[in-house]
Image (tube, grey):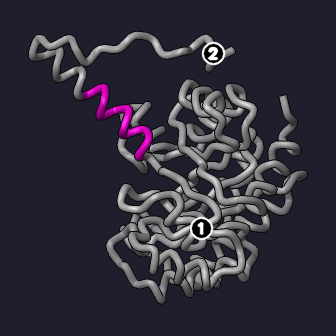
Amino acid sequence: MSTQAEKARAFQALHQGEPFVIPNPWDAGSARMLEALGFKALATTSGGFAFTLGRLDGEVTLDEVAAHVSALAEATDLPISVDLENGFGAEPEAAARAIERVAEAGAVGGSIEDWDPGESRLYDPVHATERVAAAVEAARRQPFPFTLTARAENHLRGNPDLDDTIARLQAFEAVGADVLYAPWLQTTDEISAVCDAASQPVNVLATPDLSFAEITTAGAQRVSVGSRLAWAGVEAAEAAARGLLAGDLSGLRGSPPLADWFR
């Protein structure tokens, strides 16, 4: 098994090489499957993990996320970055504490966003930047290169103000964010505008309307899938289960090659 520092350096190097996909497992089994299939790094999904607990996205605690990260880090040798939502608190100290907790649990990266779930609003840009700065400071205190991703949530939260999104990401970059992320960009023009305005690597959330080549040609270094891979699995299980209710057993499947994946 690689050490945490080795995983951290490998994750850092991925952002300096060719563009790559970082899939989002929702449990230890899916993490091991993705590793066996050949992916080089993993990112957690807050929505997918919440589903495993029978909850909605945003209803999980930092303690539960840290335990989840520990389980993934024990199951796979790949670098793990963590969806930390807003850092489980509005204040900068909360964002810093979230980084420290998941680093202790085995993660080598994590993201902090500028959405306040309690108030259902975006943090004002100054406060949002202070929160990212605190998270960066916590990342730099780690004994390995923790990769801090800063998220501007405008587009995901129904406010597709590209100029404001870019201004927020530039402010996050200025205080030390390693990767920039504006979820829900929908066109190559939007992706290009964000990437052209940034000096640091940009993560883009995959959309079925764009290919990996289109997204990366527009400038993205990293492409993540959020909870969409988890929902693909859930929808397949739902379809098979609905068939069972109707007496149709054709949706059932034999075991996948678990012995190969989990060796």
Indicate the quadrant containing the N terminus: top left, top right, bottom left or bottom right.
top right
Work out whether residue 114 can be spotted.
no
Q: Is residue 56 left or right of residue 84?
A: left
Q: Is residue 35 visible?
A: yes
Vertical placement of residue 7 versus 201, above or below = above
Residue drawn where x is 65% and y is 32% of the image: 35
**Position in image of residue 33 (x %, y %):** 58, 27
Q: Quadrant of residue 118?
A: bottom left
* Segment tinted magenta in the rendering: 228-238
Q: Nearer the viewer, residue 189 or 86?
A: 189
Instruction: Judge whether 166 appears above or below 25 on screen.
Output: below
Is residue 234 in the magenta section?
yes
User: What amino acid is at disc 1?
Assistant: Ala
Toward the viewer: 148 or 93?
148
Mark 2 belongs to which amino acid?
A: Asp
Q: Is residue 262 above or below residue 177?
A: above
Q: In x, y percent, where is residue 237?
A: 30, 25
According to the picture, the residue beneath numbered tag 1 turns out to be 220
Residue at numbered disc 2: 260
